Structures are given as C-alpha cells and as structure tokens.
Amino acid sequence: MHWILNGWKRLLGWKRLFVVGAIVLLSTVSLMAPANAARLQDLPNEPWEVVALPTQESMLDLAFTSNPNHGWMVGTNSTLLETFDGGQTWKERQLDLGTQKYRFSAVSFAGDEGWVAGQPAILLHTPDGGQSWERMPLSEKLPGSPEFLEALGQGDLEMVTDVGAIYHTTDGALNWKAMVDDAFGVVRSLHRSADGQYIAVSSRGNFFSIWKPGSRQWEPFNRNSSRRLQNMGFTPDDRLWIIARGGSIQFTNSPDPEDWQKAQAPESFNSWGFLDMAYRTNDEVWIVGGSGSLLVSFDNGQTWYHDAKMDQDVPANLYKIEFLNENDGYILGQRGTFLRYRGATA
C-alpha cells in the first residue's frame, strides 16, 4: 500500500506542475496577443459601393474608351459587359464566337480602339469603342495564351502571354515582334509600370522576374523570405511592392529590387491573405483579399485602416483593384462581385 500512496503523490505532483505551467503559458500568450493581433481602426465612412452585375461569372479586367463613362469588362465563360454611366450599371454583350467558351482575361483601350484577349488563345479588336468587334488571327506557335494587353493607340499594342512571352505590334496585330528571346514560365501575376517595365511572379511564388524595355531577357530574383509570393507591382515613384502568403506585405526603399524594407502584416490575427494592391494617390494605397477584406493606408503603407462593412456585405474574395485616376476606382471579385469607388476617404 505504501508504494501505491507514493505513486499517487507523484502523479498529483505532476498534475499540479502541469496546471501551473499551463497557467503561465496562457498568461504569456494573453500578454503577447494584443501587440501581435491588434485590430485596425475602422474607416469612418464607406467610400465603396457594391454594384449588381447581370452575371455571376468572375470578372477579370475592365477598361474605358475615350468617353470616361463608356467602359467594358471581361470575365470567364466568354462574358463581356458594357457600361455607359461610369460603371453604375452594366449590360451583357453577346459576340458570335461559336460554341467554344473563353476565359477573357484582359481588355485594353487607347481612345476608341480596344482589344480583348483570353484563353484558349483569342484576340478581339474594335476600332469604334465596341460597336463592332473583329477576331484577329494568332499563330498556332504562340507560346501560351494571351494574358495581358496594353493598348498604345493606332494599331500599336503590347501583348503578354500566360508564360511571359512579350510581343509588340504596330500594324493592328497583322505582324508581331517578339520582345524577349525566352518565355518567363507559367505566370502567377503580372504588372506593368508606367514606363513599360513588367514584373512577374512565378506560378509557385518561388521567385519573381523583371523585364525592362530594350532587354531581351527577364531578369530573375529570389524571394527575400520563406513566404511564397502572391502578387507584385510598382508604386507611383517606381519602387516595388510585394504581397506574400499569410497576409504579409513589403515595399522597397528604392527602385532597386533587392532593397526591401521590413515585412509587415497589417492584420496578423486573420487567417485570410491579400491578393492585390493599388494606389489612388502617391500616398493612398488600397489592399484587397479574401472574404471581402479591404484595407487602406493614407501614409504609403505605414499605418492601415480597415473597411469593416465589406466583411459583412461582401462575403467573396476580392482579387483585383484598379484606379484609373483619383476619382475612378474599381474592385473585381469572384461570382460577379463588383465594387465602385464613389468618394474621398481621407
């Protein structure tokens, strides 16, 4: 009996030690949590409005003609939408493209000349703001399918495929010039700067590459942390930004692609991630992401505010944000989700 009693005493001692340790651990976590997971301050007003679309297809890109109220939006399942009131209302347009369904990934206008591209490989052209559309021939040897377009006017167009092959035409897509000798590889995201540079993230987010006008090659760079890259782009002053997995963002101090500031996580307590970033002004930058997440910084990314209303009203992933100018901004999301910027936020 004596050894049994001693066994119970030892067991009770270990249990007390476990309980005390657990209390200390929980106390430590509770003291650390506010510093690492403090909620952001909510925006005092609601600068974005949700616009109902006549489709539940996911829209992928939009552009406007010479008339700032007349625009086009493209998406999955050959979806083509048109607006005449600056994006307040949209109507679906049907084109005779046969039985094949296309993923329209890009649309771009220079004045009233516009282009639409997508997968399987397709390129459409309009000279008159979209009153008429013509399908342009593409070579069967084209590496990949068209993913990005930049209309430059009067038959001048840049096209990038989903494997990073860059092409340029000056005669309305009758003849093309390859701008790089080798394709980049499967592209996860792609952004173009105002001076014509491209930055692309690899499909697995392991590295990124930059192409500059006049170069014949993409210049590769390793990611600077263990987090895989989600998206990258250019700031208005030609620096770079990164969105990495897990809600991490980062900016460079200069245009140097290896001169990175310390990474930050604006809302580290959330499990969703960010998907895209865009500047409204030189200092005001917006981020969109999963589950309707929408954040803004008025001081170039130093402090952030949260649009809490979007979490409740928009239960969809927001994956593209674009500002055409300081007054006109748009957000695209899954299942026909579309938001329109309607007022100042500061």
Image: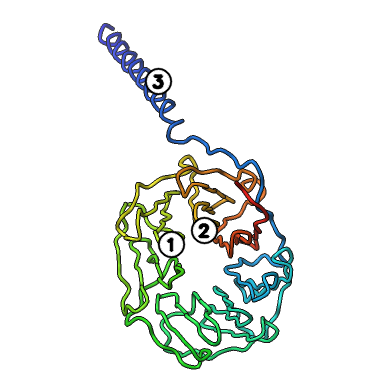
Callout 2 touching callout 3 (CB < 8 Å): no
Residue 135 vs residue 184: left or right? Answer: right
Kind of residue indicated by mark 2:
Ala
Residue at the spot 42% in from the left edge and 49% down from the top edge: 248
Whichever of callouts 1 and 3 sits on the residue coming sooner in the sequence is 3
Element at badge 1? Answer: strand
Front residue of 336 and 153: 153
Element at badge 3? Answer: helix
Element at badge 2? Answer: strand
- Mark identifier at residue 138: none
Residue at the spot 67% in from the left edge and 65% down from the top edge: 56
The CA span between labels 1 and 3 is 47 Å
Kind of residue indicated by mark 3:
Ile
- Mark identifier at residue 23: 3
Residue on which disc 1 sits:
234
Few, some or many C-alpha atoms within 10 Å of disc 2 (few <14, some 14-19, many ≥20)? many
Residue on which disc 2 sits:
278
